[in-house]
Image (cartoon, helix red, strand yellow):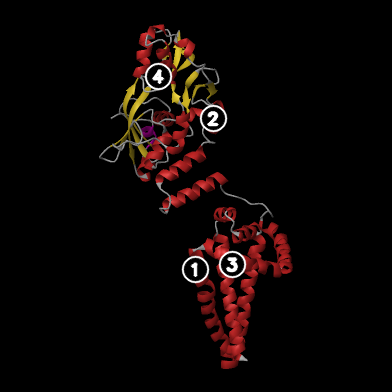
Amino acid sequence: MNWLALTIVLVCLLVSAFFAASETALTGASRASMLRLSKQGNRDADVVSSLLDMRERLIGALLLGNNIANIGASALATGIFTGWFGEVGVLYATGVMTALVVIFAEVLPKTIAINAPDRMALAVARPMRMTMYVLGPLLRVVEAIVRLLMPLFGVKVGEHQALLSPTERLRGAVDLLHHEGKVEKLDRDMLGGLLDLRELQVSDVMIHRTEMVMINADLPADELVREVLATEYTRIPLWRDRPENIIGVLHAKDLLRAIRASDGDSSRIDVSTIALPPWFVPEMRPVSEQLKAFRRRKTHFALVVDEYGEVEGLVTLEDILEEIVGDISDEHDVVVAGVRAQPDGSVVVDGSVPIRDLNRALDWHLPDEEATTVAGLVIHEARSIPDRGQSFTFHGFRFRVLRRERNRITALRISPVPREAEVEETRPRRAGTAF
């Protein structure tokens, strides 16, 4: 009789180990992986997804089965040891069963499952579905009791209270994979840039009007052609009377066709007839919508205007794509134009460098909600336009103004500082101190 009881105890331990491994595997399985496998025709993945959709009942089945097996094994073991050693057998049974349950029914199966949760989830999916079917009536009673008790603890029934949005959770997953070395920095930046498109406005990615290359449409034809050939761009805005009055956009290919049609005589070309009409877009338009507009209109160039209709800059399809793939670096390791690393660990940057590009290149986290460029961030924090030589400390970095041209900050030196040093900075110091 003791041998039969011992066999039942071992079977209960195996059942407990199965439920422990199933709990770890199913709660740790990736729903994204299951969805992918399901689309590839894996039926077990469909079962796993259906189990995860019934998370409350699944947890109830796992805990109920695990506790029945553990309690049953402990009760039988207590009877066996009591028959062998008398009343002191209760202590022996407690010690032996604690060791067996912890090692072989909890730690070992859960460790195995946590190392390959997706594979283990696929293996236990069908047995767990059968278990849930068998224990269905009992599980419904347990669920009813739990739902009655949940409001007493301030938990709303059926409401998933997520801490982060789905986009932020996806971004966190990508950052975690990068931290673990499974995703390269370039891929992480590309995925992050793609997720940021809906949060960005056209004004965040546009080329400001102070950096735009424009040509006077009233120039003599020969001189205008020389101006176009001297630029590095294929689309150039044309203005008349004043730079703010843009009358069209000249495409270099259209100009070449016109030169060929005139047998090489550029003086016979009237650029106003070959220029394309300008396309104006509002600066507050989301970048994701502008990308769709570019595809819909089959054009790559738009002029950005503010709420008063004044031209603020221009945006191209390439500008939006660079928000995803990043700038293309050359063999001299210039990751971002206008950013120069110094031997002492500091970085010299042009004031017009976008904060997002600087963060992406150096893995910094400077805020870009209130300003688009580095110079704009310094002006926002200083609440004034600093003079050359003034320095500021905020957001874990020290900013020193190297050059200023009229009302523009054109160059700064940025040095990371310990957080303690930033806290010790006094208020007058943060407002600007000249060296």
The label on residue 409 is none
Whether pointer 3 and pointer 4 mark residues with C-beta atoms closer than 8 Å, the reply is no
- Separation of disc 2 and disc 4 at Cα? 24 Å
SS at mark 3? helix
Nearest to viewer (mark 1 / mark 3): 3
Q: Nearer the viewer, residue 344 or 116?
A: 116
Q: Which residue is mark 1?
A: 112
The label on residue 295 is 2
When asked about the image quadrant of residue 135, the answer is bottom right
Tag 4 or tag 2, which sits nearer the N-term?
A: 4
Whether pointer 1 and pointer 3 mark residues with C-beta atoms closer than 8 Å, the reply is no
On screen, residue 146 versus residue 123, left or right, reads right
Which kind of residue does numbered mark 1 sit on? Answer: Ile
The label on residue 124 is 3
Q: Residues within 10 Å of mark 3 (few under 14, many from 20)?
A: many
When asked about the image quadrant of residue 269, the answer is top left
Tag 2 or tag 3, which sits nearer the N-term?
A: 3
SS at mark 4? loop
Residue 98 in the image, given as x and y percentages of width and height: 54, 78
Tag 2 or tag 1, which sits nearer the N-term?
A: 1
Which kind of residue does numbered mark 2 sit on? Answer: Arg
Q: Which residue is mark 4?
A: 213
- Separation of disc 1 and disc 4 at Cα? 63 Å
- Separation of disc 3 and disc 2 at Cα? 47 Å
- Separation of disc 1 and disc 3 at Cα? 13 Å
Numbered range of the magenta stretch: 426-430
